[in-house]
Amino acid sequence: MKLSKENSFSKLILLSGIILFGFGLMGHFVSSYIISTVKESLDQNSQNHQPRSGHHRPPKKHLGPPRGPHHLPHHPPHHRRPPHPQVLGLSPENANSAILFTFLILGFSCTLFIASRTMKETARKAQNVFDEINRGNLSARIHLTKGSPENSIASQFNQMADKIEQLIADIKESERNKIEVFQELAHDIRTPVAGLNSLLETINEHSESMSKDQLQQFTSSCLSESKYIAKLVEDLLFISGVNKSKDLQNFSKINLYNLLTEEISLFHFKNIQLNTTCEDVETMANSFLIKRLFRNALENATSFAASQVIINVVDLDPHQWLITISDDGPGLREEDLKLFGQKSFSRKAIRSEQRLSIGLGSFIMKKIVEIHKGTITIKNIVNESSQRLGAVLKITLPRV
C-alpha cells in the first residue's frame, strides 16, 4: 500500500482538524456547564437573601408636619441587585473564550504529540531497516499497516530502499556482463588470433618461396581474420554498452525513411529498393541504436542476396510501423532460424570473407528492438514446392 504525499498531507490536516474540533467542542461543553452552574448558584443565593412577604410592614404615616431634623420623612431602602455571575474572576463571555482557547491549545499540543510519536516510531523502524540493509538484507522494508498515519513516510522510505536495491542489482548485473563479455571475448578470439598468427608465421618463413598468387591468398586470409576479430570485439563491446549505458534512454523523434536512405547509401550493393506508403514515417527512438539495427540487417541481407534486396515500410496499424527487409538469397537453415536472436557465434564463408552471421548480429538487433518496445522475426520465403527463395526480416516499431 503506497500513499502519495498529497493524500498523506490531507489525512494529517483531517486528523488535526478532528482533534481540534473535538477539544473545542469539549471546551464549549465544559464552559457552558461551569457558567450555568455559577449562574444557578448566584440565583440561589439571591433568593435566600430576599425578605419574606409575611413580615413586611408598611411604613407609618405622619399626621403632622415635621418638627425637626430628626423627624424627616423616612423612605424605605431599595433592595440590592444581585451581583453579575463571574467565572474565575472573568465575565461569562471572557471565561467562555478563555476555556475554549485553553482546550484548543490542548488539542494543538495533542496533535503535535501524535505527530512527534509517529515520526519517532517511523525513524525507529527506518533505522532497523538501515541496519538490516547494512547487514546485507537488501529486501528489508518497513511494514505498512492499513490506515496508519505513518504509511506515507514509510512508503517513501520503502521506495527509496527499492531504488537502492535496484541500483545495487544493476551494478552486480553490469559486473556480471563485463565478466561474461571478457570471457566470451577471450574464448572466441583465441581461434582467429591463432589462425592469424599461423598465417603470418607462414608468410614470414616462406614468403620468398611463395608464388604471387599464394602470397596474395595468404594475405587475404590474414585480412579476413583481422576483420573478423575487429567485428567480434566491436559486437561484444556494443552488447556490454547496451546493457548499462544511460544514454540509450535519450529518445527523440526520427524519420525511419530518411534514416534507411542514409544507411543504404553506405552499401556498395547496387540493387536495394526502398518502398514506403508515405515518407512521414516517424517514431520515438535512439538514432544511434536504430542505425545499428538497420546496418546489421542490411549487412546480412546484402551478404546473402543473389541480386536484390527489397525494403518496405508500411503502417501496420495506427500504433506500429512494419519494416520488412527481404533478399533473394539461399535462405536460412532450420537451426539458424532457431538460433536467431540468441547470443551464439558462427563463422561462414560469404564471398570469400569470414564474418559473423546469425550470431551476435541477430542478438544485437533483437536487443535494440526490445529496447524500443518493438518486435523482430525472420523466416524463409518459399514457393508452393517449399523451395527456399530467400529470407525476409520483419521489424515493428511504435508510431509517434
Image (cartoon, grey):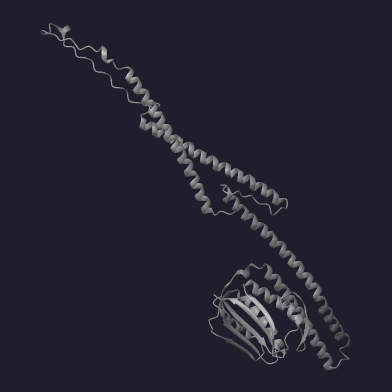
Query: Is residue 104 in view from this perspective?
Result: no
Locate the N terminus by quadrant.
bottom right
| Nearer the observer, 185 or 161 | 161
- In this view, the residue farthest toward the front is 54
In the displayed structure, 368 sits above or below 62; it is below
In the displayed structure, 33 sits above or below 375; it is above
Q: Position of residue 72 (x, y in %)?
A: 16, 10
Q: Position of residue 207 (x, y in %)?
A: 86, 89
In the displayed structure, 73 sits above or below 281; it is above
Q: Position of residue 398 (x, y in %)?
A: 58, 75
In the displayed structure, 224 sits above or below 26; it is below
Determine which quarter of the picture holds residue 295: bottom right
Would residue 63 appear left or right of 400 to someone viewing this image?
left
Q: Which residue is found at the position 44% from the left and 38% from the top? A: 25
| Nearer the observer, 40 or 176 | 40
Q: How many marks?
A: 0
Determine which quarter of the picture holds residue 182: bottom right
Locate the C terminus by quadrant.
bottom right
Would residue 236 appear left or right of 82 to someone viewing this image?
right
| Nearer the observer, 226 or 278 | 278
| Nearer the observer, 388 or 152 | 388
Would residue 141 appear left or right of 93 to someone viewing this image?
right
Q: Which residue is found at the position 64% from the left and 71% from the top? A: 371
Query: Is residue 192 in view from this perspective?
Result: yes
Q: Position of residue 316 (x, y in %)?
A: 58, 80
Q: Which residue is found at the position 60% from the left and 85% from the top? A: 312
